[in-house]
Image (cartoon, rainbow, N blue to C red):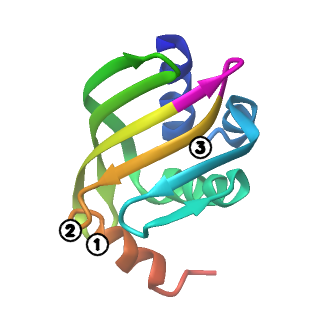
Amino acid sequence: MNELADRFFAAVSSGDAAALTDMYAPDARIWHNDKNAEETVAENLRVLRWLSRTVENLRYEDIRRYPLPDGFAQQHVVRGNLPGHGPLEVAAGLFVQVRDGRITRIDEYVDSAAIQPLYAVSASPREQ
């Protein structure tokens, strides 16, 4: 399970959508506490690609991972630099369910105050 987790977070950091697609089960769902909503794999991949393109030096630090019978739980701090806003530091926890070597569900809990700068950037006009 550690190998899958390591590959998953490396793919998120680098924006490797092909690797992420391979790690997700086609019908996987990703739930976020800040929106109290689930995303499909396609919706989640759009967000993760945007995140990796937008946050400079995106990385996961202070990782604590715990094996579960059907996956793993992980606490970490997402760090990077958000252009126009400075350093980004978001504490988060995930519960990840895995079946047949693929991620079937993620329940993500983030510090909703810490991600407000991401919402500000995503709502601002994009340069062409």
Q: Quadrant of residue 79?
A: top left
Q: Residues within 10 Å of mark 3 (few under 14, many from 20)?
A: many
- From the viewer's perspective, is residue 26 above or below residue 115? above
Q: N-terminal of the two: label 2 or label 3?
A: 3
Alpha-carbon distance for marks 1 and 2?
Answer: 6 Å
* Residue closer to the observer: 104 or 63: 104
Residues rendered magenta in the picture: 97-102
Which dot, 3 or 1, sits closer to the camera? 1
Residue highlighted by disc 3: 15
Q: Amino acid at mark 1?
A: Gln
Q: Give SS at disc 1.
A: helix
Q: Position of residue 55 (x, y in %)?
A: 41, 55
- Secondary structure of the magenta portion, mostly? strand
Q: Would you say residue 27 sits in the magenta stretch?
A: no
Q: Quadrant of residue 57?
A: top left
Residue highlighted by disc 2: 113
